[in-house]
């Protein structure tokens, strides 16, 4: 229907091809909207295929035995300036954590040997599973693993001996060459005594959705600079992820260690089984390398302006900032002596601090050289 057109004219407008929109099968599940990749109305082949193909949902949230023990954090969506294949490769690589996320979830100076072994041999349409072992595992950790459900879901799991679990959910889809859209959350599972595993209880604390989104930049931007330039550098050497590429990714890199097993499996599957990324002809060119930090670490255009939680919070914080500066001006005008200086100064400093915090909605630049 065309709601803004008078009913007696609607039939005439509907007969014009420019007014017709393609209909895609879709469903809503676990807080996400799943859209089938081919158009078709009810009863079409696309609709039937969609109904027969379940989306790659989070199994822990479907497990009835975990009822009352499992909870998920809010979803976070971000457009990232590097390719989908580099995103998947990165999160499948446990060795990147101590290097990329030094000071946050690891220490680059205390890297220990990591052994990655397949739990199931990869094949088209199957679930890839790898066990991850390192010398730093302590007695409370039972198993660590990485699971990949092609093409878009990676689950990083730590399961503790007391039954508690922490699961990092990482969806990704290629949006254009050199760009990927990441959708992620965390799943927390209490142990048999009803307690969350040590170290992850922080993520269960109540916090505004917008604050969760803002803090995510601290983690995502640590990988960002490496992966953007890694993709560009390998492209300069001739690496392509397009479906008609004949060159092997492994020709351009050196992956000798056991910790590289998941990356090797993924890259071989992508080229030999999946056939690469099927970009449309003429739209498969990688965009230029970005050297401007404000553009590379942009948050506003890759998230804030599209997120109703963050855009609304930004408007409200601007109002609070204005109120603080106005109150500082009034305090100086009304009060006398040290009281005017003290109260006015505190309000002005609060406004300046808030203004600095608000920059996280626009840009968050990260320097590995400064993170020591």
Image: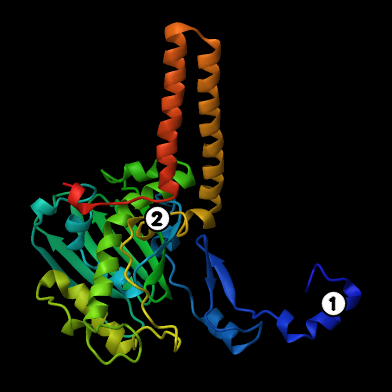
Residue at 57% over, 85% down: 46
- Percent of width and height locating residue 80: 38, 64
Q: Quadrant of residue 134?
A: bottom left
Q: Quadrant of residue 291?
A: bottom left
Q: Which residue is mark 2?
A: 66
Between residue 111 and residue 127, name the one nearer to us: 111
Residue at 46% over, 23% down: 347
- Percent of width and height locating residue 251: 17, 85
* Residue occupying the far top of the picture: 337
Instruction: State whether residue 91 appears in this view.
Output: no
Instruction: State whether residue 204 appears in this view.
Output: yes
Residue at 38% over, 59% down: 295
- Percent of width and height locating residue 77: 45, 59
Between residue 263 and residue 354, name the one nearer to us: 354
- Percent of width and height locating residue 59: 40, 65
Please identify the quadrant where the N terminus is shown: bottom right
User: How would you rate the neighbour count of disc 2 (Cα within 10 Å): few for under 14, some for 14-19, many for 20 or more?
Assistant: some
* Disc 2 element: helix
Color style of the picture = rainbow
Please tell me which of labels 1 and 2 falls first in the chain: 1
User: How would you rate the neighbour count of disc 1 (Cα within 10 Å): few for under 14, some for 14-19, many for 20 or more?
Assistant: some
As drawn, is 362 to the left or to the right of 99? right
Instruction: Using the numbered discs, state the Cα–Cα distance from disc 1 to disc 2 in whole angstroms.
Output: 51 Å
Q: Which residue is mark 1?
A: 10
Q: Please say if 311 is above or below 233.
A: above
Tell me the mark number nearer the camera, choosing from 1 and 2. 1
């Amino acid at each position: 229907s065309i709601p803004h057109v008078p009913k007696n004219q609607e039939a005439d407008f509907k007969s014009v091809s420019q007014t017709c929109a393609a209909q895609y099968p879709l469903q809503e599940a676990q807080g996400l909207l799943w859209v089938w990749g081919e158009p078709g109305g009810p009863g079409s082949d696309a609709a039937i295929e969609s109904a027969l193909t379940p989306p790659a949902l989070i199994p822990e949230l479907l497990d009835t035995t975990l009822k009352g023990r499992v909870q998920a954090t809010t979803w976070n969506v971000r457009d990232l300036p590097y390719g989908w294949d580099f995103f998947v490769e990165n999160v499948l690589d446990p060795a990147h954590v101590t290097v990329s996320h030094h000071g946050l979830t690891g220490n680059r100076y205390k890297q220990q040997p990591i052994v990655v072994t397949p739990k199931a041999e990869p094949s088209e349409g199957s679930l890839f599973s790898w066990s991850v072992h390192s010398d730093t595992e302590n007695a409370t950790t039972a198993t660590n693993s990485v699971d990949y459900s092609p093409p878009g879901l990676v689950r990083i799991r730590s399961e503790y001996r007391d039954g508690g679990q922490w699961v990092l959910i990482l969806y990704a889809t290629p949006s254009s060459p050199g760009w990927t859209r990441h959708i992620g959350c965390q799943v927390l599972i209490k142990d048999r005594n009803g307690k969350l595993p040590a170290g992850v209880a922080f993520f269960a604390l109540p916090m505004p959705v917008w604050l969760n989104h803002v803090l995510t930049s601290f983690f995502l931007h640590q990988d960002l600079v490496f992966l953007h330039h890694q993709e560009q550098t390998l492209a300069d050497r001739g690496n392509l992820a397009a479906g008609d590429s004949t060159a092997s990714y492994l020709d351009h890199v050196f992956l000798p260690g056991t910790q590289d097993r998941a990356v090797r499996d993924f890259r071989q599957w992508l080229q030999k089984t999946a056939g690469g990324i099927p970009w449309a002809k003429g739209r498969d060119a990688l965009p230029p390398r970005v050297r401007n930090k404000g553009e590379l670490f942009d948050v506003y255009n890759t998230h804030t302006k599209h997120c109703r939680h963050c855009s609304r919070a930004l408007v409200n914080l601007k109002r609070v900032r204005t109120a603080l500066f106005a109150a500082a001006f009034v305090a100086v005008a009304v009060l006398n002596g040290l009281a005017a200086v003290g109260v006015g100064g505190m309000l002005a400093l609060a406004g300046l601090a808030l203004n600095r915090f608000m920059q996280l909605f626009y840009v968050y630049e990260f320097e590995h050289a400064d993170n020591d």
